[in-house]
Image (cartoon, grey):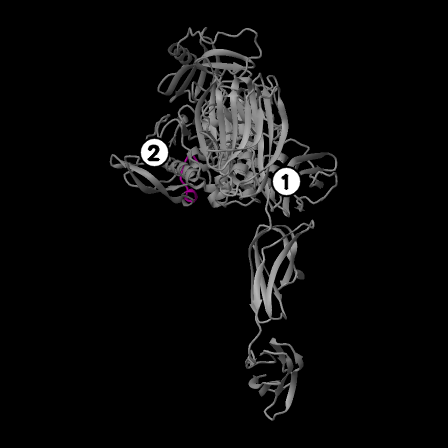
Amino acid sequence: MNTYLRKQLSLFIALILINFSFAQKPPVISSLQLVPDESEVTFVKNNMRINQETGVPVALYKPDYAVTKDSPEKMAQQYLSENHDLFKFSAGLSELRYLTTRETPAAYHVHFDQYIGEYPVLNSRINVTISKNNRVVFVTNGSKINYNSKVVSDLERINISSEQALILAKRYLGVKGIINFEKSEPGIYYNKGTFRLAQVVTIVPSEELFGEWQILVDAQTGEIFRAEDVACYDDPVKYKPELVEGSGYVFAPDPITHARTTYGTPGFVDNNDADSDSLTFHRELVALHDITFEGGVYVLKGPWAEIRDFEAPFTGLHTNPTSDFFFTRSNKSFEAVTAYYHVDNAMRWINNTLGISLHPFQYTGGVRFDPHGLNGDDNAHYIPSTGQIAWGDGGVDDAEDCGVILHELGHGLHDWLTNGSLSQVQGLSEGCGDYWASSYIRSTGYWTPSDPAYNWVFIWDGHNPIWPGRITNYPAHYPEGLTGVIHTDGQMWASSLMSIYDLIGRNATDKNFLTALSMTNSGSNQQDAANAFISADQLNYGGSNLVHIIPVFADRGYISGPVTADFMADVTVGNAPLTVHFTDLSISQPNPITSWQWDFNNDGIVDATDKNPTWTYTNFGYYTVKLTVSDGTYSSTKTKANYIKVTDPNVFEWCEGFTNLSNWTVVGPQGMSNWSTVNTTNAGGTAPELRLGWSPQFNGTSKIRSSVINLPDNQNALFSFNYYFDFFSSPSGTVTVGVTYNGGSTSTLIYNQVDATGNIGPQLITGSFTTPASGSQNAQLEITFSGNSFNYDYVYWDNLCIQYLIPVELTSFTAIANGTEVELNWQTATETNNQGFEIERMSENGQFEKIGYVAGYGTTTESKTYSFTDSKLSEGKYTYRLKQIDYDGTFSYSNEVNVEVELPIEYSLEQNYPNPFNPGTTIKYSIPADGFVKLSVYNLLGEEVANLVNGHQKAGRYEVNFNAGSLSSGMYVYRLETQNYVLSKKLMLMK
């Protein structure tokens, strides 16, 4: 029998999906199984996996669809409603029922089931993943469509009750002895385009016939038409019993790994569960966290794991009189302790370290397990209907090998993350179990890549004469390497994940793995899971690991080829000059990419041929980026339109793209529910856009108002928006866009449309307005419709923007006189296109003249400081101003500043500075009248050693620099001589 086909659909009952039962070893196919061919052909196109018969997507890998911020359930409903045609749902989604929402650190996963009338359609789970920034990033769709029968079956009349169906199912299985779980409920079975009303019976025997049996009984005829063993061979709550810390001996991870040896080495064989010195030595003493003390004994029952005895051979709960569970492997309690430790440790890792809240949904408390089940057979399983795990004892006891323990727990994780919608399509869940076991074992660091056991799963239980085990370096290529045997095919998925593990580490791989599974449903295959893993990394790590992940998935075949171009930029929006680092994400198989051609501005010119180039954009605007890659035979081109936005730092821009309405408030007073954002482009912009609907009908005024926009006073501002008016009949009412500065009390009109007589647009509306002299910092935009909403169909707006040019803003301009000098200082807050400043001076009764120039900083939003010194001025009053000049030649004048230069009223000679000095110093002096001046330096013998000034000077203040580099150290005298004044001072030269 083709195991792949018979496992392709898993069933669920009522609100809970009935899952497959998975063993770490392939179970023997029972003659009781009755599984028809349920396969349907799908293909991948435009990031969707599509059902070939119906044209409906069963998985959407990158919808990137914006929804209005609300509860996860309502956001998912918005997406499904706005895309109901794509999924062939009714407009009101009447066939869907909300089930639950799971939350992971970066997303919500919202689950719905399909119903026909009062009964659930089996295996119809819809799972919508929404990022925390309100975008739908992944969807799996299990809904069903009748396409293969013109006659609709009677899906309401029930002749066979649930109780009768249960009796028929037990009779079919020949069940005897204790039954662990049983249930019978009506549901609608689907296969290849037709529906059939059934009683869905689930039976989990505790003796003899093990597994989880799902029997479908025709609800009208009583025919048993489907039977399958779907058992999975495998929250915390606060316990009232006392929780204590215990300890115990376990295999961690297993004795072969711990000793770095192989099975069959002396002392390292099962030998019918007998002890050996080697096996005893390679136990680990570990802490057993939060075990329970009750009834005078210690029980392996904690918030994350709980021992149960629900299957033969019924060995009990393995309680202990002390908290020290010290056993060797020959004691049946050893497996109980080992299982508790590894399950508890794994659940703590998920919840506490990775931050993913995960518990069994079938019950509260820790994961329930039976360390000795399956009547002692050499297998293990996870049971979906009860959420329990059991391990057998044949060969090496399964609960002695953490690989087997964690593999079965991996099935449980898959089941719980999907809320009962686990998938075994292409052995997906088997691969998940193998990965989860291998991830922990590799993290212990015992094996190196050169060791064969580095890629082994079930190192103690398998890879021996008892059972060959499995590997995580499985070479098969997807999809042609699929065999239809789920345990074999699952190795593809596990091997790919372990390759990624080696590149990005355990934490990131585990977190992406669990997040990805949360996006899937019971129909998901390995390709869906790979694309979900890519989305998970974008959610969890911003896509930082995709450069490692994508090549692995491409090599495996999950991502189509032979060459697919793709890339990303580290920044896509910023002020000029904007430097962008591009990263190639292209994939190719089987040959590597050998050439890259980048066109950074879509002008047809190749700008770079490096794999990961850097480009600087200096001009403002939007840039389309194109990458063409080739492996020498095949090529692929990826174009991202308007991918880079380079903004002018001198231009303020406020833009609303209507991703959602978080910046808007509907103020009505009518049409309060008519405003929404929709994923359409009717106005001529890019999805999403703002829409005003006509229904519910109103006759009056409906208004929506933006949050506050801080605008400057007395500023000319430009506005623009995309617009489309979908006319229905006259009079069609008035549409306005205005600006209010007082919370809506009054409004300034900037656009007005009155009683259109036909469709308007799509078109770009532009214009300008001037802000008032005060209060502009309180600006808000208002969009209003007044009239009868029945007379239009819809009105759309998009990309509503306000822009204004940031001017050269002078914050200060001062002039300070200092002797015969005037120091000018000024400061700007912002500058736009500023070439520089000409400094102009006017004396009393004169005209302004240019006396200097200082270059500007061009365009900047940072504060800048400037200075200029006007020297050798005569006594008098002066006026200064700045002429600011733009690069285009336009100019403007600053305010004027006045200053008075006053000449000295007496002769003076100041002490030199510095003093002592070596070799230079400065000498300052003042003369109140024009005349002859001599300034000289003498040694102590009266000999002149330097003449600094000797000539006629105008009245004023002066300073002279004296360099004594040619003189010897010592005391010297400097003397000022004029016609009416002589004064001397000493100075000291020290070399």
Q: Secondary structure at mark 1?
A: strand
Residue position for label 1: 644
Q: Secondary structure at mark 2?
A: loop
- Classify 10 Å Cα crowding around label 2: few (below 14), some (14-19), many (20 and above): few
Horizontal arrangement in the rendering, residue 734 relative to residue 402 (left or right): right
- Disc 1 versus disc 2: nearer the observer: 1
Label 1 to label 2: alpha-carbon separation: 50 Å
Viewport quadrant of the N terminus: top right
Visible in this render: residue 176?
Answer: yes
Q: Which mark is residue 157?
A: none
Amino acid type for the residue under numbered disc 1: Ile
Which of 333/39 is in front? Answer: 39
Q: Position of residue 684 (x, y in %)?
A: 62, 28
Q: Earlier in the sequence, mark 1 or mark 2?
A: 2
Q: Is residue 494 above or below residue 974?
A: above
Amino acid type for the residue under numbered disc 2: Val
Q: Position of residue 698 (x, y in %)?
A: 48, 19
Residue position for label 2: 237
Magenta residues span 271-279
Q: Position of residue 185 (x, y in %)?
A: 41, 15
